[in-house]
Image: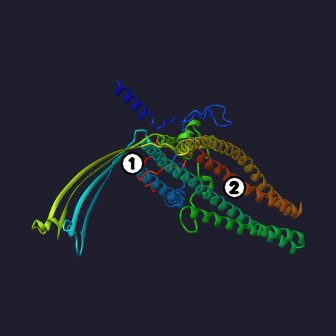
Amino acid sequence: MKLIFIALTLTQLLATCVPPYDRPNAELPPVYRDQSTPPPSPASIGDLGWWQFFKDPVLQRLLRTAVAANFDTLIAAQRIQEAEANLTIVSSNRYPQINAVLNAQYNRTNGQVPITSPRSTFAPNGLLTLQYEVDLFGKVRSATAAARAEVLESQFAREAIQTALVSSVASLYFQLCELDEELRITRATLSARRQSLALVQARLQGGIGTLQDVRQAQQLVAQAAGYIPQIQLAMAQAENAISILIGAYPQRIARGLPLGQQVAMPAMPAAGVPSALLERRPDIREAEQQLIAANAQIGVARALLYPQFTIGVAAGAGSTQVGGVGIASLLGRASTWYGQGFIQIVPQIVQQIFNAGAAHANVGLSQAEKQAALLQYVQSIHQGFGDVSNALIAYDEDRAYTVDEAANAAAAVDATRLANLRYQGGITSYLEVLVSDTQSYGAQIGLVQARLNERLALVQLYKALGGGWQAEPNTQRAGSNATLRSE
């Protein structure tokens, strides 16, 4: 009966040695902000790989290079290898530690020695030792569970870096495309203004214009010419930023499709089911693995409150050669070999008796660290929902703003045309042309920037929904050994 009771008690201890983990209930909302009904489909643009979301072949090459050569991703890949090596070290404690020891000791005494003592001895022997800690209270299993969670945490950390990297490279590339449009508009405006200046100067020479008209026309030309170096400076800075992100020195970046053909601009982007965000965003999954690791560390701390049971076994064999004066010489033999062998079993139980409360404080420390990790996990979920909501609102508002800017630009361009006709017909002064031309240029630049902001908002939504970490098919992810993304 006693044996049954002991077995049941031991079984209960073994079943509860590693603290169980249950995902916290974050009470997720059924829809994102400003969504009145749940989405009709669970599909989300965040499920798309970056090579599916971005269609420009030049941008795809840049992203492919960035994913493989960006220094932050390479460093994160090394962190994965560190975590995997640590997992191997920690999990090895589940098995016996076996060591072999070989030695050969030789001693010789010169001068007078007692008749019963040999002048020289030679004792070669071999020893095999085994050390094993019986993991009754789950210390090793809890430590292994924590190390395994840290491996996944490092993987998700790398995926989070890649998500941010894809978003940054794409955003900078779109800015380059927008700056190309600005440069084209500015050069076309400069050419038109120079033609207008020539016309005004001809009118002055013909006696039907004024010097003030000439000065105003020169002002317009100088303004347009001054915008060009500013745009080119911004282009060079964007190119340098992309170069650093792809792991290269500053260099010129090739262009592919124009800004308007970069990504599809749906009227309502597919955001998917809000609860899927927990499984798609790598930063949320990274925070959850931190929580899992902290939970497992409580098991390690609790196990230290109980006895640590260790079994040590040593077995050896060898021989000793005795020579010179002494018993061997008295027996008429120059040297004698004596064989020997032994085996030793040392079970050991260590129980802390007094440590000024350090062991219990260690449990309290682990529990506090778990609570902090829990709050960080919930915070990451709230931040993820905030990112998606902000991106959805920005996309909707930017699309509406782009429609207004398109109407404004069309009206401003036509107003400039009419102002030039009125000036050439002598109906109005050149001041009207100056104002209309300035407004037209600003409206055209504003329209291009609005189209950029619209696409940047879509990129931010793609990032907020967890898109960009996926590995491209038929490519090798740098730095990852054989650990797969957990599902």
* Mark 1 Cα-neighbour bin, 10 Å: few <14, some 14–19, many ≥20: some
In the displayed orientation, state which residue is furthest to the top: 1
Helix, strand or loop at mark 1: helix
**Mark linked to residue 22:** none
Q: Earlier in the sequence, mark 1 or mark 2?
A: 1
For residue 12, say whether it is visible: yes
C-alpha separation, residue under disc 1 versus residue under disc 2: 62 Å
In which quadrant of the rendered view does residue 366 lie?
top right
The picture places residue 408, in percent across and down from the top left corner, at: 77, 51
The three-letter code of the residue at mark 1 reads: Asn
Q: Nearer the viewer, residue 90 or 207?
A: 90
Above or below, comparing residue 388 to residue 222 in the picture:
above
Decide which of 112, 414 is in the foreground and name it. Answer: 112
Question: Would you place residue 473 above or below residue 236 in this image?
Answer: above
Residue depicted at x 41% and y 35%? 14
| Residue at far left of view | 332
242 lies left or right of 450: left
Q: Could you say which is closer to the camera, residue 139 or residue 89?
A: 139
x and y, in percent, of residue 256 in the image: 56, 59
Image side of residue 122 versus residue 256, left or right: left
Q: Nearer the viewer, residue 447 or 457?
A: 457
Location of mark 1 (residue): 93
**Residue that label 2 marks:** 448
Q: Is disc 2 surrounded by few (<14), some (14 to 19) or many (20+) residues within 10 Å?
A: many
Query: Mark 2 belongs to which amino acid?
Result: Val
